[in-house]
Amino acid sequence: MTGTAARGRMDKRQAILDAAFEVFARCGYGQACVKEVAEVAGVAKPTVYNHLHDKETLFRHAVTAAAEGIAERTISALDALRDPAGDLRETLGQVTRELAASCCDERAQALRRLTYGETAQFPDVLESVHARTALDLREVLADRLARLVVAGRLRPCEPGEAAGHLLALITGPLDARSRMGTRAVPPAEVERVAESAADVWWRAYGAPAGPAARWGS
């Protein structure tokens, strides 16, 4: 297979996965049909089967691909904490706003509705999505926070716990307000949740006692 042909095949596969996620999110697994996926993707029905074999495989791959894309965008919000210059509290506010916005993004909400709605039939898919969108995010955030602790810019703490606390302060209120992805959260509410999360977290972990403070010292 030539490079052009391989890229064409991958592009077609991605189009099928995007279409499948759209159809499954709208209809649920039970009501969705491969024919509609093919129509949305702009391909023939046999093409879907050639790429993904059957409806269950299509579902699993479509949800996983959506989770990976959402996770990639969400984790990019943490770039500001890699080596922040200036006011760290201000940077934290920026990060919490971006994380909150990502949490309430239409695609993220659709993923939440779909995975929770199909938990009884696909419990392993929920676990997989959680690992990609929550556990990986927490791990990256913990790494960023650990570096800030070592630099003396945060109070000594266990970075994994601190990361978990920050994410819980964002996702907990937003999950409640969105009713697990079934209600759009107004931007003003998202902003308030983000600012409250940053404020509460900063009170616990910000403003270290001294420049020499280090985690584990």
Image: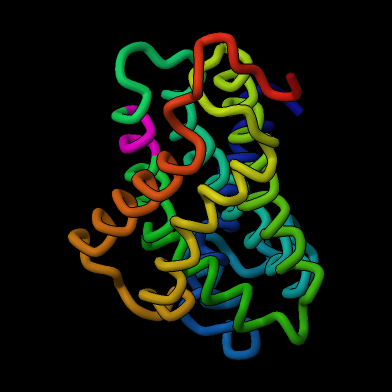
Provide the major secondary structure of the magenta segment: helix
Residue 116 drawn in magenta: no
Q: In this view of the protein, can residue 182 be seen by the observer?
A: yes
Above or below, 192 relative to 92: below
Would you say residue 42 is visible in this rendering? no
Identify which residue, 115 or 31, lies in the foreground: 115
Q: Position of residue 154 (x, y in %)?
A: 52, 25
Q: Image quadrant for the C terminus?
A: top right
Q: Is residue 45 left or right of residue 154?
A: right
**Stretch of the chain drawn in magenta:** 91-95
Outermost residue toward the left in this view: 188
Q: Nearer the viewer, residue 64 or 204?
A: 204
For the rendered model, the colour scheme is rainbow
| Residue 200 image offset from top left, x and y in percent | 40, 50
Q: Residue at x 32, y 35 (%)?
A: 94
Please identify the residue farthest to the front as the structure is shown.
209
- Tally of numbered discs: 0
Where does the image place residue 83, in percent across and percent down from the top left? Answer: 48, 13
Q: Residue at 69% across / 23% down in the picture?
A: 215
Apparent side of residue 85 relative to residue 118 in the rendered image (left or right): left
Answer whether residue 93 is magenta in the image.
yes
Q: Foreground: 149 or 117? A: 149
- From the viewer's perspective, tell me whether residue 46 is left or right of residue 123: left
Seen at 71% across and 68% down, the residue is 126
The residue depicted at 64 percent of the width and 60 percent of the height is 62
Q: Position of residue 66 (x, y in %)?
A: 57, 54
Q: Is residue 160 above or below residue 63?
A: above
* Image quadrant in which the N terminus is located: top right
